[in-house]
């Protein structure tokens, strides 16, 4: 039997709340079902990373770099995206080649993780799945954007114009998209 290996991209594990808590529970369930899971993040709180490793029995690859919650990340986004792609490609290449008996798939949550997963899925000729909690608020949540100060609102609108379409393309290119529904 071929065991699937999942390489999951997530921007950060800085705060243990909301999406991060949900992600841990999802990954624990996936592990319980016999999948091999590696998580790649840009940055994270060391205690939260240890929690994922210990409670989730997960391999966590921390790039120790800026992430989507950092203003500097967005100022130099194209540079960070290329640097992340290069570093994540190297990690993914080791993961893919580590055990040829495993069918590898890429998973992503949130932009630009979905864009990275899409690009790598094409390079490695592997499937890519998108797990959506919500549309990326910096680009698509007008209510969120409108509640910001004038300067932040202006920056978010520029980012939405420049990169929002990349988020849409990456979501559409997923083999399947999964959505968290709360009623």
Image (spheres, rainbow, N blue to C red):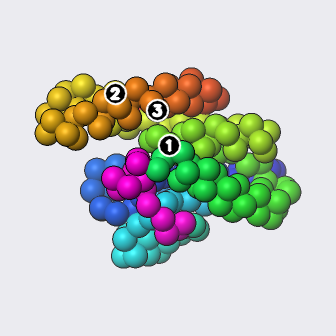
**In this orientation, which residue lies closer to the viewer: 110 or 157?**
157
Residue drawn at x 48%, y 47% as measured from the top left = 77
SS at circle 2: helix
The quarter of the displayed image where residue 52 is located: bottom left
Q: Residue 22, how many percent across, how many down?
A: 36, 50
> Disc 1 vs disc 3: Cβ atoms closer than 8 Å?
yes
Mark 2 crowdedness (10 Å alpha carbons): few <14, some 14-19, many ≥20 = some
Check disc 3 and report the residue beneath it.
163
Residue designated by label 1: 112
Pair 2/3: label in front = 3
* Residue 140 numbered tag: 2
Q: Marks 2 and 3, Cα distance to the nearest angstrom? A: 11 Å
Mark 2 or mark 1: name the one nearer the start of the chain.
1
Q: CA distance from mark 2 to mark 1?
A: 14 Å
Observer-nearest of 31 and 149 = 149
Q: Read off the magenta span.
A: 62-75
**Residue furthest right as drawn:** 100
State left or right for residue 16 relative to residue 112.
Answer: left
For residue 32, what is the image quadrant?
bottom right
Q: Could you say which is closer to the camera, residue 183 or residue 177?
A: 177
Of marks 2 and 3, which one's residue comes earlier in the chain?
Answer: 2
């Amino acid at each position: 039997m071929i065991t699937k290996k999942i390489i999951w991209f997530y921007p950060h594990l800085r705060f243990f709340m909301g999406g991060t808590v949900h992600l841990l529970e999802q990954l624990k369930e996936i592990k319980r079902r016999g999948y091999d899971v590696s998580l790649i993040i840009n940055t994270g709180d060391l205690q939260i990373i240890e929690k994922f490793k210990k409670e989730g029995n997960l391999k966590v690859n921390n790039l120790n770099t800026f992430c989507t919650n950092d203003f500097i990340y967005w100022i130099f986004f194209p540079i960070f995206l290329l640097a992340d792609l290069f570093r994540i490609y190297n990690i993914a290449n080791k993961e893919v080649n580590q055990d040829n008996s495993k069918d590898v798939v890429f998973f992503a949550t949130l932009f630009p993780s979905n864009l990275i997963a899409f690009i790598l899925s094409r390079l490695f000729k592997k499937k890519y799945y998108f797990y959506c909690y919500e549309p990326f608020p910096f680009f698509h949540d007008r209510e969120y954007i409108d509640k910001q100060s004038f300067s932040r609102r202006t920056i978010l609108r520029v980012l939405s114009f420049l990169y929002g379409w990349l988020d849409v393309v990456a979501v559409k290119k997923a083999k399947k998209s999964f959505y968290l529904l709360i009623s």
